Image (tube, helix red, strand yellow):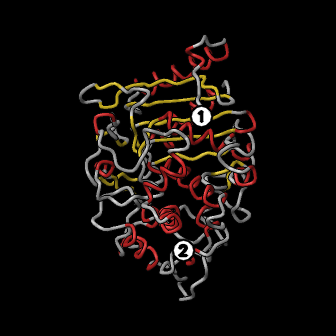
Amino acid sequence: MILQSKHETGAGRDESALANRLDSIFTTALRERRIVGAVAVVASHGKVIYRRAHGWAERETQRPMHEDTLFRLASVTKPIVTLAVLRLAADGKLQLDDHVSRWLPDFTPRLPDGSQPPLTLHQLLTHTAGLSYGLLEGPGSEYDLLGISDGIDRVDFSLEENLRRVAGASLVFAPGSAWRYSLALDVLGAVIERVTGAPLADAIAQLVTGPLGMHDTGFVSDEPTRFAVPYADGAPEPVKMTENVSVPLPEGHGVAVRFAPSRAFEPTAYPSGGAGMYGSADDVLRVLEAVRDGKSFLPDALRAAMYVDHTPPGTETRGPGWGFGYGAAVLNDPVLAGSPQSAGTLQWGGVYGHSWFIDATRGLTVLLLTNTAYEGMSGALTLEVRDAVYGD
């Protein structure tokens, strides 16, 4: 699944027009100091038609962004770990309707009434298990009081200890009855370790990154000079992140993400299956293309299940018209969502400043990696890039 850039072979007028639109968008975003740097890639039916770096990997030293710059992926980790779970299902090593307690006997969280309903791997994949994130629960919540890590900060305990704390917090709803973005993929990381008998980093390499030729992706790197320095939204310009800094989410309500940029270089940091990986744009594109058209990577039925909305009726994940499949939100109603994307489009991102979507109906895969939170995840830039791809 090697993707070739049409810019190397002579782009047609459509590709040139797309490049002009996208270049203009990034020029404006940089001039307005909404982002520090970015790498954007657009592929059409597996052929790269736009792949360019913009701005700075490190503003203070004027180190330019490059196409192969490495990024802390945050929740772009999730589709990688999702593919690993689905590979294990395809190989008959686990079943998606397995109870989590089959693999993690001590992970049996309770509802507020004290009952202990079973959780399934399917519910973890779809964030319908009743778990949550500390960043969503806020100060004074059980997640806060138990010291639960969201997998982005630096802590001095293991994955097993973090899951023990998660299991000690009450489920926020009965499994299968609602949707809440959560630490479910961290739990699945522990399941992967139990099923394979290997540390998560080794299992992911065997199941996903190795087979897909992703040589620039992992959990802990020894190449810090290749990384984009992370920044947080600020005025008059983004602010360089410090260690374990809390950055309020745009939605407000006193909720913030606690970032620890050094985590990507710390061998003792536990591997977070929901937020702990790093990688390059080319490597992430390989993952997204495996989701879009990876016939040799996943059986058709499992790949098709990624595009099915598995949430209860009435759920809104990214707003009206959006449900959730495996690994990402799925667009049910483009009109309701006010989007030019096709029904069935998958989309998600990451809090370090990333966004991606797959419009399989039109053969489009679009990836935006930035070093600016949260503009690159949920700011105006994401909509500008989306609309430019569709010709608006």
Three-letter amino acid code of the residue under disc 1: Val
Q: Which residue is mark 2?
A: 103
Secondary structure beneath dot 2 equals helix
Left or right? Give the position of 243 relative to 199: left
Nearer the N terminus, badge 1 or badge 2?
2
Q: Residues within 10 Å of mark 2 (few under 14, many from 20)?
A: some
Secondary structure beneath dot 1 equals strand
How many numbered circles are shown?
2
Q: Please say if 333 is above or below 255.
A: above
Three-letter amino acid code of the residue under disc 2: Trp
Image quarter where the C terminus lies is top right
Q: Quadrant of residue 232?
A: top left
Q: Please say if 209 is above or below 386.
A: below
**The one of 207 and 118 positioned closer to us in this rendering:** 207
Mark 1 and mark 2 residues within 8 Å of each other at the beta carbon: no
Left or right? Give the position of 359 relative to 284: right
Q: Which residue is mark 1?
A: 366
Coordinates of residue 205 in the picture (x, y in percent) = 47, 49
Residue lying at 59% horizontally and 70% vertically, measured from the top left:
129
Q: Residues within 10 Å of mark 1 (few under 14, many from 20)?
A: many
